[in-house]
């Protein structure tokens, strides 16, 4: 292998070696698709389990560059799904701790770590990327990113996983609703979802976001019982007497809403990554801005909300 | 790991995760993702088996491997990579074939759950039978391109892997390959046959170059001819692409339609200068002289490789550049002669290698769903283990992951998982030999490993090598296996037995299949009605005088196949196309181990579901000499 010198061969400058590595996917999306991928620059905010999955899938696919952005420290809960951090890593920052394993996935991709909180960057920061993918942020940051990305025409994904449940918002053709239209806020920055004719997964996602705004954190296994009660109260408050939602519909979910669990990060992270890839290649199915993975129903479904 | 953190799971689930020993069969595309998900979820007692080593073309998706691990055993490297993010798990890795006799019933019975991440039907069917025999639940999976599926299998609770008929591989008439190609694929198959005749192990009819200058002289094979001429590239070119074509043109009635008639190349072409092709893109179609140069170069290079084997054969491999150049040049030279559009190196490699596209994301989605199913299965929540399908595009409701409404009950007539498995085998008892029964029907078609066959307390086939029965060359009627005979077939290794009822039907025409298998008499009758209907409707189909199976594609159901429990036919016509899909992982049986992950190839054995025009008494493993005028 080492004696094969990379040579240009009229296929967009891919080396022979790259063509061998990407062969099985080039046969799916073609050389043109692969060449578009090779220009794709991604900002990935949040390097917990879901971030690790998204990073893995994009790096394997052979994008141009990815910036892993996280200002927080590695936590014991990362063990549920963060496979890019070696068990004996001395590095405390999540992004920095992930970078060696991430780069090893594919030497052709430029992988870098960024430990600045996104709120400390100015508006122009996102404009050097084709796609911004945000996870594990506050809904207020999501709202701000949605506005900024729409203004700069940067494709945006906002994704989160709660236990085995997960969802994402996407803004790819800059035509559908902004984040704060999907999840409306009131004057006090509370989420006030309009749940009429919405799927139960939307209600659950809204409740979880509201929980995050109220408590400045996600539900936590340490305080699981208390958090379940809080969540139930939130759901009751946002869906009073809604006949479309059975009162005990969510009971099944409650015990599986903690941490980012690997089966769900694996699924949601792959759908996010594939949609990001499709959006760069122009293969996207238009008309959807939300995706929910419902682990109870074994259903992964796009919606227009 | 999730299950070690209090509060993540309910205590019962937490214990189930920590205590359940799981077997993962396959450490390829899905296997790598499943292993990661299992370990992160907190499963800590795992065994993983795979017989493959890592290749460069795996690296776009099998993320536990990297450049440094190319050539090493997948199972071992996967284990080491996973231990980097969690050293506190007990993982045992095996480099081996799951169909090997080391992995017997007592091996399987140690597990709470088995997960299949395989790439071939044969191994899947085998694991299915092993799990049924020891009553261990099994999760079966597959992906192709953007799509995939997860199925749960438990004895008496769900469909088993073999409850529903699988789509048959596409097949091509041998005479089209040999004499009247019409599409690029015909020339590709021909080129692969030619490769095996010249350099590999050929168990097939010669597709070219039966040399009989005078009719009274004994014919020599293409291989013998080539050796006699010391693989001289120019002579071989003339023989294969000029003389053989002249031979075809001399055959009366072969080309009634002028449009399909081959165009003879002038011998002056042999004097043309060498045309360099080495810097051309594999997407480009080259000119004729470049293909001639490529052909001659490949002959010389492959001959050198053959010499290094010390009298053994070469095994075709799509990742060998010289082998591929031989296939590409032969395909396009022949296509050119027959007026068939030429194809690029890239496209010919796809078809010749039967390369199935594979991406990381589809594997990750399926692997996530596998672990969700594992959690439901371990807590015996079987009704929530319905089949789940990953769609390439959202359906009209926007769904890409879709489940079946309910877990399907077992097929009461399944020849594998029902209590009294019974099959009807329709064949011409004067033509099918005991060897064909053993190799083509029991092992290849019915996926057995070590079958024993009894009829009226007589042993016909024994898996014990000490039993020297020597009945292989007899046709069935010669040993009193006739219409109405009941064969008791046992595979002790798979702990599987089935009664096979023999239904004699004279093979009157060549189009008729050599054998057909039915689950019951009703299916047999339905099949006959269908045949009559087809006859009446005068559906003009090509004459399949000698059908070959192109390759064994794996099964995949995007939408449910209706449980018709119909016949398992040993041929398929073009009109029978069903969506087939291959899944993607890496444990395959030894004969298929030449394949890359996710790819299946035309191996000699698979090709050899050959409907022979005559001479059915011959043993199937013997090459049968052909004549052009058959
Ligand atoms: Zn069955």
Image (cartoon, rainbow, N blue to C red):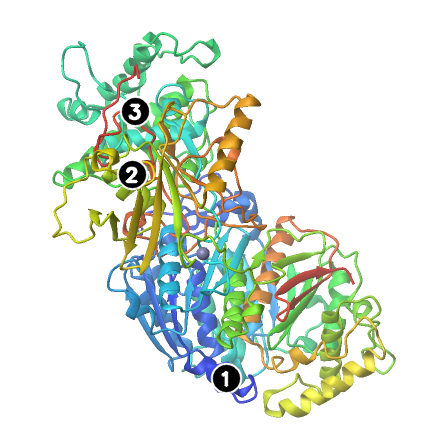
The residue to which callout 3 is attached is: B207
The residue to which callout 2 is attached is: B604
Vertical relation: A35 (above or below) B366: above
To the question of a shared chain for discs 3 and 1, the answer is yes
Question: Of label 3 and label 1, which has the lower sequence position?
Answer: 1
Does the residue tagged 1 have its C-beta within 8 Å of any atom of ligand 1?
Answer: no
The chain holding disc 3 is: B
B323 or B423, nearer to the observer: B423
The x and y percentages for residue B360 are 50, 58
The chain holding disc 1 is: B
Q: Is residue B382 left or right of residue B198?
A: right
Vertical relation: B350 (above or below) A302: above
Q: Are marks 3 and 2 in contact (CB under 8 Å)?
A: no
Q: Calculate the distance from the C-alpha at mark 3 to the C-alpha at mark 1.
A: 61 Å
Per the image, label 2 sits on a secondary structure element best described as helix
The residue to which callout 1 is attached is: B14
């Amino acid at each position: 292998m080492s004696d094969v010198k990379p040579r240009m061969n009229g296929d967009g400058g891919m080396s022979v070696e790259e063509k061998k590595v990407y062969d099985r996917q080039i046969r799916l999306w073609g050389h043109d698709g692969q060449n578009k991928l090779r220009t794709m620059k991604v900002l990935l905010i949040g390097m917990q389990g879901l971030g690790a999955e998204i990073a893995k899938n994009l790096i394997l696919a052979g994008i141009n560059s990815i910036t892993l952005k996280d200002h927080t420290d590695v936590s014991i809960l990362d063990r549920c799904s963060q496979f890019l951090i070696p068990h004996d890593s001395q590095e405390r920052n999540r992004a920095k701790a992930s970078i060696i394993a991430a780069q090893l996935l594919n030497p052709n991709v430029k992988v870098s770590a960024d430990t600045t909180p996104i709120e400390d960057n100015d508006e122009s920061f996102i404009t050097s990327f084709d796609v911004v993918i945000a996870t594990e942020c506050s809904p207020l940051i999501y709202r701000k990113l949605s506005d900024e990305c729409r203004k700069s025409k940067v494709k945006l994904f906002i994704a989160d996983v709660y236990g085995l449940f997960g969802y994402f918002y996407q803004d790819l053709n800059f035509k559908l609703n902004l984040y704060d239209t999907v999840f409306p806020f009131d004057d006090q920055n509370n989420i006030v979802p309009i749940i009429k004719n919405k799927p139960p997964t939307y209600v659950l996602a809204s409740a979880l976001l509201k929980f995050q705004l109220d408590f400045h954190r996600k539900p936590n296994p340490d305080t699981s019982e208390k958090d379940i009660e809080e969540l139930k109260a939130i759901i009751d408050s946002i869906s009073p007497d809604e006949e479309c939602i059975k009162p005990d519909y969510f009971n099944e979910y409650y015990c599986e809403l903690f941490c980012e669990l690997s089966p769900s990060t694996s699924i949601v992270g792959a759908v996010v990554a594939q949609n990001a890839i499709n959006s760069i290649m122009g293969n996207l199915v238009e008309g959807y801005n939300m995706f929910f993975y419902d682990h109870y129903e074994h259903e992964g479904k796009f919606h227009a909300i | 790991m999730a299950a070690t953190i209090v509060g993540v799971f309910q205590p019962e689930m937490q214990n189930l995760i920590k205590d359940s020993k799981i077997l993962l069969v396959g450490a390829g595309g899905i296997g790598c993702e499943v292993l990661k998900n299992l370990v992160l979820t907190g499963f800590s007692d795992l065994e993983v088996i795979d017989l493959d080593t890592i290749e460069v073309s795996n690296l776009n998706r099998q993320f536990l491997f990297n450049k440094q691990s190319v050539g090493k055993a997948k199972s071992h490297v996967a284990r080491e990579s996973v231990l980097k993010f969690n050293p506190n798990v007990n993982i045992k890795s095996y480099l081996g074939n799951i169909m090997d006799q080391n992995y017997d019933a007592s091996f399987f019975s140690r597990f709470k759950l088995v997960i299949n991440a395989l790439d071939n039907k044969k191994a899947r069917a085998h694991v299915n039978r092993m799990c049924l025999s020891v009553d261990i639940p099994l999760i079966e999976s597959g992906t192709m391109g953007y799509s995939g599926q997860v199925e749960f299998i438990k004895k008496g609770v769900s469909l088993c892997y073999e409850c529903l008929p699988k789509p048959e591989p596409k097949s091509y008439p041998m005479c089209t390959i040999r004499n009247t190609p019409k599409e690029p694929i015909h020339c590709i198959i021909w080129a692969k046959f030619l490769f095996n005749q010249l350099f590999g192990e050929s168990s097939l009819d010669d597709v070219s170059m039966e040399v009989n200058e005078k009719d009274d002289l004994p014919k020599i094979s293409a291989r013998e001819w080539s050796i006699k001429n010391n693989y001289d590239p120019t002579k071989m070119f003339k023989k294969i692409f000029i003389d053989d074509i002249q031979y075809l043109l001399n055959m009366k009635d072969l080309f009634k339609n002028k449009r399909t008639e081959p165009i003879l190349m002038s011998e002056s072409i042999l004097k043309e200068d060498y045309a360099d092709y080495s810097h051309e893109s594999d997407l480009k179609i080259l000119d004729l002289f470049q293909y001639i140069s490529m052909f001659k170069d490949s002959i010389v290079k492959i001959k050198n490789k053959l010499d290094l084997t010390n009298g053994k054969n070469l095994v075709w491999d799509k990742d060998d550049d010289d082998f591929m150049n031989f296939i590409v040049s032969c395909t396009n030279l022949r296509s050119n002669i027959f007026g068939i559009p030429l194809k690029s190196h890239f496209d010919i490699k796809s078809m010749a290698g039967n390369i199935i596209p594979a991406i990381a994301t589809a594997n990750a989605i399926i692997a996530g769903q596998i672990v969700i199913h594992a959690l439901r299965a371990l807590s015996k929540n079987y009704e929530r283990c319905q089949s789940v399908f990953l769609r390439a595009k959202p359906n009209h409701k926007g769904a890409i992951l879709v489940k079946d409404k309910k877990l399907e009950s077992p097929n009461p007539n399944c020849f594998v998982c029902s209590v009294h498995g019974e099959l009807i085998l329709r064949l011409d008892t004067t033509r099918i030999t005991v060897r064909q029964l053993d190799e083509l029907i029991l092992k290849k078609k019915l996926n057995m490993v070590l079958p024993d066959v009894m009829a009226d307390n007589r042993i016909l086939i024994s898996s014990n090598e000490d039993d020297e029965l020597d009945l292989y060359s007899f046709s069935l009627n010669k040993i009193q296996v006739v219409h109405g005979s009941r064969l008791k077939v046992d595979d002790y290794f798979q702990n599987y037995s089935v009664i096979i009822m023999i239904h004699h039907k004279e093979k009157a025409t060549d189009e008729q299949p050599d054998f057909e298998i039915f689950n019951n008499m009703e299916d047999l009758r339905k099949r006959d009605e269908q045949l009559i209907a087809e006859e009446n409707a005068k559906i003009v189909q090509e004459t399949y005088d000698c059908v070959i199976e192109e390759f064994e594609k794996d099964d995949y159901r995007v939408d449910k196949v209706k449980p018709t429990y119909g016949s398992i036919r040993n041929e398929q016509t073009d009109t029978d196309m069903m969506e087939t899909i291959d899944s993607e992982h890496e444990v395959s049986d030894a004969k298929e181990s030449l394949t890359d992950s996710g790819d299946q190839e035309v191996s000699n054995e698979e090709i050899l579901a050959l409907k022979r025009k005559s001479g059915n008494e011959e043993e199937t493993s013997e090459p049968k000499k052909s004549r052009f005028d058959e």
